[in-house]
Amino acid sequence: MDIKKDIPHIPVLLNEVVEVFRDLKDGYFIDCTLGYAGHSEAILKNSPKIKLIGIDQDEEAIEFSKKRLIEFADRVKIVKGRFSNKIDEYLSLNIKGVLADIGVSSLQLDKRERGFSFESEVLDMRMDKSATLSAYEVVNFYPKERLEYIFKEYGEVKNYKKIADIIVKTRSKKEIRSAKELSQLLAKHFTKTKKIHPATLVFQAIRIEVNEELKELERLLDKLEKHRPKGAKIAIITFHSLEDRIVKNRFKKWAQKCICPSESIRCECGKNNELGYILTKKPIIAKKEEVEKNPRSRSAKMRVFKFK
Protein backbone atom coordinates (compact mmCIF):
# COMPACT_ATOMS: atom_id res chain seq x y z
CA MET A 1 0.00 0.00 0.00
CA ASP A 2 1.29 3.46 -0.92
CA ILE A 3 0.40 5.40 2.23
CA LYS A 4 0.64 8.81 0.57
CA LYS A 5 -1.67 7.75 -2.29
CA ASP A 6 -4.13 5.83 -0.12
CA ILE A 7 -4.80 8.39 2.62
CA PRO A 8 -8.53 7.82 3.28
CA HIS A 9 -9.43 10.86 5.37
CA ILE A 10 -9.03 14.61 4.96
CA PRO A 11 -8.32 16.25 8.34
CA VAL A 12 -10.43 19.36 8.93
CA LEU A 13 -8.90 22.77 9.67
CA LEU A 14 -5.43 21.35 9.00
CA ASN A 15 -3.73 24.69 8.27
CA GLU A 16 -5.48 26.29 11.23
CA VAL A 17 -4.34 23.50 13.59
CA VAL A 18 -0.74 23.86 12.39
CA GLU A 19 -0.96 27.62 12.95
CA VAL A 20 -2.28 27.20 16.51
CA PHE A 21 0.63 24.91 17.39
CA ARG A 22 3.28 26.55 15.22
CA ASP A 23 5.43 27.61 18.21
CA LEU A 24 5.92 24.13 19.73
CA LYS A 25 9.64 23.73 20.40
CA ASP A 26 9.99 20.65 22.59
CA GLY A 27 8.08 18.47 25.03
CA TYR A 28 5.00 16.39 24.20
CA PHE A 29 1.94 16.87 22.04
CA ILE A 30 -1.15 14.71 22.67
CA ASP A 31 -3.47 13.97 19.77
CA CYS A 32 -6.50 12.58 21.60
CA THR A 33 -8.17 11.50 18.35
CA LEU A 34 -5.29 10.29 16.19
CA GLY A 35 -7.52 8.91 13.44
CA TYR A 36 -5.55 8.66 10.21
CA ALA A 37 -2.81 10.95 11.58
CA GLY A 38 -3.38 13.93 9.28
CA HIS A 39 -3.09 16.50 12.05
CA SER A 40 -0.32 14.58 13.83
CA GLU A 41 1.86 14.24 10.73
CA ALA A 42 1.62 18.00 10.09
CA ILE A 43 2.55 18.79 13.72
CA LEU A 44 5.53 16.41 13.65
CA LYS A 45 6.79 17.95 10.40
CA ASN A 46 6.36 21.49 11.67
CA SER A 47 7.94 20.86 15.10
CA PRO A 48 11.00 18.58 14.66
CA LYS A 49 11.72 18.29 18.40
CA ILE A 50 8.19 17.61 19.64
CA LYS A 51 7.19 14.08 20.72
CA LEU A 52 3.72 12.78 19.92
CA ILE A 53 1.32 10.66 21.92
CA GLY A 54 -1.52 9.58 19.65
CA ILE A 55 -4.67 8.02 21.11
CA ASP A 56 -7.45 6.27 19.20
CA GLN A 57 -9.94 3.46 19.77
CA ASP A 58 -10.22 2.41 16.12
CA GLU A 59 -7.82 -0.45 15.34
CA GLU A 60 -8.02 0.16 11.60
CA ALA A 61 -7.03 3.82 12.01
CA ILE A 62 -4.18 2.90 14.37
CA GLU A 63 -2.66 0.40 11.93
CA PHE A 64 -2.80 2.97 9.14
CA SER A 65 -1.25 5.68 11.32
CA LYS A 66 1.64 3.47 12.40
CA LYS A 67 2.64 3.16 8.74
CA ARG A 68 1.97 6.82 7.95
CA LEU A 69 4.15 8.04 10.83
CA ILE A 70 6.94 5.48 10.37
CA GLU A 71 9.53 8.19 9.56
CA PHE A 72 8.85 9.76 12.97
CA ALA A 73 8.86 6.42 14.84
CA ASP A 74 11.43 7.58 17.44
CA ARG A 75 9.15 10.50 18.38
CA VAL A 76 5.77 8.73 18.33
CA LYS A 77 3.84 6.60 20.82
CA ILE A 78 0.45 5.29 19.69
CA VAL A 79 -2.06 4.14 22.31
CA LYS A 80 -5.32 2.24 21.75
CA GLY A 81 -8.32 3.18 23.88
CA ARG A 82 -10.67 5.98 24.80
CA PHE A 83 -8.83 9.24 25.26
CA SER A 84 -10.68 9.97 28.50
CA ASN A 85 -9.21 6.78 29.99
CA LYS A 86 -5.71 7.02 28.56
CA ILE A 87 -4.79 10.71 28.82
CA ASP A 88 -4.27 10.55 32.61
CA GLU A 89 -1.13 8.48 32.07
CA TYR A 90 0.59 11.29 30.16
CA LEU A 91 -0.58 14.60 31.61
CA SER A 92 2.27 14.61 34.16
CA LEU A 93 4.77 14.88 31.27
CA ASN A 94 5.96 18.16 29.76
CA ILE A 95 2.79 18.66 27.70
CA LYS A 96 2.87 21.61 25.29
CA GLY A 97 -0.25 20.92 23.28
CA VAL A 98 -3.43 18.83 23.25
CA LEU A 99 -5.71 18.35 20.25
CA ALA A 100 -9.09 16.61 20.19
CA ASP A 101 -11.06 16.34 16.95
CA ILE A 102 -14.47 15.26 18.24
CA GLY A 103 -15.96 13.79 15.10
CA VAL A 104 -16.35 10.64 13.05
CA SER A 105 -13.79 10.24 10.26
CA SER A 106 -14.88 10.24 6.63
CA LEU A 107 -13.71 6.63 6.34
CA GLN A 108 -15.91 5.51 9.24
CA LEU A 109 -18.89 7.33 7.74
CA ASP A 110 -18.31 6.02 4.24
CA LYS A 111 -17.50 2.38 5.01
CA ARG A 112 -20.87 0.67 4.89
CA GLU A 113 -19.71 -2.21 7.08
CA ARG A 114 -19.21 0.24 9.98
CA GLY A 115 -22.93 1.04 10.09
CA PHE A 116 -22.74 4.85 10.14
CA SER A 117 -24.02 5.32 6.60
CA PHE A 118 -27.68 5.62 5.59
CA GLU A 119 -27.02 2.88 3.03
CA SER A 120 -25.30 0.47 5.42
CA GLU A 121 -26.54 -3.11 5.61
CA VAL A 122 -25.60 -3.28 9.31
CA LEU A 123 -26.62 -1.22 12.33
CA ASP A 124 -23.41 -0.70 14.29
CA MET A 125 -21.84 2.80 14.68
CA ARG A 126 -19.13 1.67 17.13
CA MET A 127 -15.86 3.57 16.82
CA ASP A 128 -14.25 0.79 18.84
CA LYS A 129 -15.39 -2.47 17.26
CA SER A 130 -14.67 -4.38 20.48
CA ALA A 131 -17.23 -2.31 22.45
CA THR A 132 -20.35 -4.18 23.55
CA LEU A 133 -23.02 -1.55 22.84
CA SER A 134 -23.92 -0.95 19.19
CA ALA A 135 -26.68 0.94 17.39
CA TYR A 136 -28.50 -2.37 16.93
CA GLU A 137 -29.09 -2.68 20.71
CA VAL A 138 -30.07 0.98 21.03
CA VAL A 139 -32.64 0.85 18.23
CA ASN A 140 -34.13 -2.55 19.04
CA PHE A 141 -34.01 -2.78 22.84
CA TYR A 142 -33.93 0.69 24.40
CA PRO A 143 -37.25 1.62 26.04
CA LYS A 144 -39.28 4.29 24.29
CA GLU A 145 -38.55 6.89 27.01
CA ARG A 146 -34.80 6.42 26.62
CA LEU A 147 -35.03 6.75 22.84
CA GLU A 148 -37.01 9.96 23.29
CA TYR A 149 -34.30 11.28 25.62
CA ILE A 150 -31.35 10.61 23.31
CA PHE A 151 -33.19 11.95 20.23
CA LYS A 152 -34.09 15.14 22.10
CA GLU A 153 -30.82 15.67 24.00
CA TYR A 154 -28.22 14.32 21.58
CA GLY A 155 -29.89 15.05 18.26
CA GLU A 156 -32.04 18.06 19.17
CA VAL A 157 -34.73 16.35 17.10
CA LYS A 158 -38.04 18.23 17.02
CA ASN A 159 -40.25 15.17 16.46
CA TYR A 160 -38.40 13.03 19.02
CA LYS A 161 -41.57 11.52 20.53
CA LYS A 162 -43.06 10.59 17.16
CA ILE A 163 -39.77 9.09 15.92
CA ALA A 164 -39.35 6.98 19.07
CA ASP A 165 -42.95 5.79 18.70
CA ILE A 166 -42.43 4.79 15.04
CA ILE A 167 -39.27 2.83 15.91
CA VAL A 168 -40.91 1.02 18.84
CA LYS A 169 -43.99 0.07 16.78
CA THR A 170 -41.85 -1.12 13.87
CA ARG A 171 -39.49 -3.25 15.97
CA SER A 172 -42.44 -4.88 17.79
CA LYS A 173 -43.27 -6.60 14.50
CA LYS A 174 -39.71 -7.18 13.24
CA GLU A 175 -36.23 -6.18 14.40
CA ILE A 176 -34.60 -3.28 12.57
CA ARG A 177 -31.37 -4.88 11.40
CA SER A 178 -29.66 -2.29 9.22
CA ALA A 179 -28.93 1.43 9.08
CA LYS A 180 -30.45 1.42 5.59
CA GLU A 181 -33.71 0.01 6.96
CA LEU A 182 -33.79 2.66 9.70
CA SER A 183 -33.05 5.55 7.34
CA GLN A 184 -35.72 4.36 4.89
CA LEU A 185 -38.24 4.03 7.72
CA LEU A 186 -37.65 7.66 8.75
CA ALA A 187 -37.65 8.89 5.14
CA LYS A 188 -41.08 7.27 4.69
CA HIS A 189 -42.57 9.25 7.58
CA PHE A 190 -40.70 12.56 7.34
CA THR A 191 -39.91 14.83 4.42
CA LYS A 192 -36.43 16.09 3.63
CA THR A 193 -35.87 19.70 4.75
CA LYS A 194 -33.01 22.12 4.04
CA LYS A 195 -31.19 19.41 2.10
CA ILE A 196 -30.91 17.32 5.27
CA HIS A 197 -31.99 13.69 5.24
CA PRO A 198 -34.71 13.10 7.90
CA ALA A 199 -32.47 10.47 9.53
CA THR A 200 -29.43 12.76 9.96
CA LEU A 201 -30.05 13.98 13.50
CA VAL A 202 -31.45 10.63 14.64
CA PHE A 203 -28.27 8.89 13.44
CA GLN A 204 -26.20 11.55 15.21
CA ALA A 205 -28.06 10.93 18.47
CA ILE A 206 -27.65 7.15 18.26
CA ARG A 207 -23.94 7.49 17.43
CA ILE A 208 -23.38 9.79 20.41
CA GLU A 209 -25.15 7.30 22.69
CA VAL A 210 -23.21 4.29 21.36
CA ASN A 211 -19.81 5.98 21.72
CA GLU A 212 -20.58 8.12 24.80
CA GLU A 213 -19.24 11.09 22.84
CA LEU A 214 -20.48 13.88 25.10
CA LYS A 215 -19.43 12.03 28.25
CA GLU A 216 -16.02 11.39 26.67
CA LEU A 217 -15.62 15.11 25.98
CA GLU A 218 -16.70 16.05 29.52
CA ARG A 219 -14.28 13.51 31.02
CA LEU A 220 -11.42 14.85 28.89
CA LEU A 221 -12.12 18.41 30.03
CA ASP A 222 -12.33 17.24 33.66
CA LYS A 223 -8.91 15.63 33.44
CA LEU A 224 -7.33 18.62 31.75
CA GLU A 225 -8.81 20.84 34.46
CA LYS A 226 -7.42 18.56 37.15
CA HIS A 227 -3.86 18.40 35.74
CA ARG A 228 -3.68 21.87 34.11
CA PRO A 229 -0.54 21.22 32.04
CA LYS A 230 1.50 24.41 32.47
CA GLY A 231 1.64 26.58 29.36
CA ALA A 232 -0.13 23.98 27.21
CA LYS A 233 -2.50 24.95 24.42
CA ILE A 234 -5.74 22.97 24.25
CA ALA A 235 -7.48 22.90 20.86
CA ILE A 236 -10.81 21.14 20.47
CA ILE A 237 -12.64 20.70 17.18
CA THR A 238 -16.37 20.00 17.36
CA PHE A 239 -19.01 19.32 14.72
CA HIS A 240 -22.34 20.17 16.33
CA SER A 241 -23.76 22.64 18.80
CA LEU A 242 -23.96 20.24 21.75
CA GLU A 243 -20.20 19.62 21.77
CA ASP A 244 -19.34 23.23 20.97
CA ARG A 245 -21.46 24.45 23.88
CA ILE A 246 -19.68 22.12 26.29
CA VAL A 247 -16.25 23.37 25.15
CA LYS A 248 -17.29 27.03 25.08
CA ASN A 249 -18.73 26.90 28.61
CA ARG A 250 -15.77 25.00 30.05
CA PHE A 251 -13.20 27.37 28.54
CA LYS A 252 -15.26 30.28 29.87
CA LYS A 253 -15.18 28.73 33.36
CA TRP A 254 -11.42 28.19 33.15
CA ALA A 255 -10.88 31.85 32.18
CA GLN A 256 -12.96 33.23 35.06
CA LYS A 257 -10.99 35.50 37.37
CA CYS A 258 -13.69 35.90 40.00
CA ILE A 259 -15.35 32.78 41.39
CA CYS A 260 -17.43 34.44 44.11
CA PRO A 261 -21.14 33.52 44.24
CA SER A 262 -23.30 35.77 42.07
CA GLU A 263 -25.15 37.04 45.15
CA SER A 264 -21.92 38.39 46.71
CA ILE A 265 -21.92 42.16 47.22
CA ARG A 266 -18.16 42.43 46.63
CA CYS A 267 -15.41 40.17 45.39
CA GLU A 268 -13.60 38.27 48.13
CA CYS A 269 -11.71 35.71 46.05
CA GLY A 270 -8.95 38.03 44.84
CA LYS A 271 -9.94 37.91 41.16
CA ASN A 272 -6.93 35.76 40.26
CA ASN A 273 -8.56 32.36 39.83
CA GLU A 274 -8.26 32.03 36.06
CA LEU A 275 -6.54 28.85 34.89
CA GLY A 276 -5.41 30.51 31.68
CA TYR A 277 -6.71 32.36 28.66
CA ILE A 278 -9.13 31.78 25.81
CA LEU A 279 -7.17 32.30 22.58
CA THR A 280 -10.22 32.23 20.29
CA LYS A 281 -12.88 34.87 20.99
CA LYS A 282 -14.92 33.23 18.24
CA PRO A 283 -14.48 29.65 17.06
CA ILE A 284 -12.18 29.06 14.10
CA ILE A 285 -14.14 27.72 11.13
CA ALA A 286 -13.20 26.33 7.72
CA LYS A 287 -12.46 28.73 4.90
CA LYS A 288 -14.56 28.66 1.74
CA GLU A 289 -11.84 26.80 -0.20
CA GLU A 290 -11.74 23.99 2.36
CA VAL A 291 -15.52 23.62 2.44
CA GLU A 292 -15.57 23.32 -1.35
CA LYS A 293 -12.98 20.51 -1.22
CA ASN A 294 -14.36 18.84 1.90
CA PRO A 295 -18.07 19.67 2.54
CA ARG A 296 -17.96 17.93 5.94
CA SER A 297 -15.68 20.69 7.21
CA ARG A 298 -18.50 23.24 7.01
CA SER A 299 -19.77 22.38 10.50
CA ALA A 300 -16.33 22.20 12.16
CA LYS A 301 -15.52 24.68 14.92
CA MET A 302 -12.22 24.91 16.78
CA ARG A 303 -11.78 26.63 20.13
CA VAL A 304 -8.39 27.11 21.78
CA PHE A 305 -7.40 27.67 25.41
CA LYS A 306 -3.95 28.12 26.96
CA PHE A 307 -3.19 27.17 30.56
CA LYS A 308 -1.05 29.56 32.62
Image (cartoon, rainbow, N blue to C red):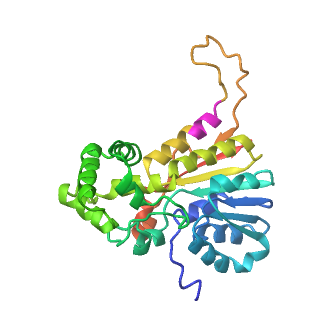
Q: Residue at x 70, y 72 (%)?
A: 45
Image location of residue 175, percent across then percent down: 30, 62
Q: Residue at x 43, y 47 (%)?
A: 241
Image location of residue 144, percent across then percent down: 32, 45
Q: Residue at x 79, y 74 (%)?
A: 74
Q: Residue at x 57, y 49 (%)?
A: 217
Residue 275: image quadrant is: top right
Image location of residue 138, percent across then percent down: 40, 55
271 with respect to 82 (left or right)? right
Q: Does the segment drawn in magenta span residue 66?
A: no
Q: Is residue 2 above or below residue 49?
A: below
Residue 97: image quadrant is: bottom right
Q: Does the segment drawn in magenta span residue 253?
A: yes
Chief secondary structure of the magenta portion? helix
- Residue 76 in sight in this render: yes
Q: In front: 186, or 75?
A: 186
Numbered label tally: 0
Residue lying farthest to the top in this orientation = 265
Query: What is the quadrant of the N terminus in the image?
Result: bottom right
Q: In front: 79, or 30?
A: 79
84 with respect to 229 (left or right)? left
Residue lying farthest to the front in this orientation = 173
Image location of residue 286, percent across then percent down: 47, 59
- Residue 279 in sight in this render: no
Region in magenta: 250-256
Query: What is the quadrant of the C terminus in the image?
Result: top right
100 with respect to 26 (left or right)? left
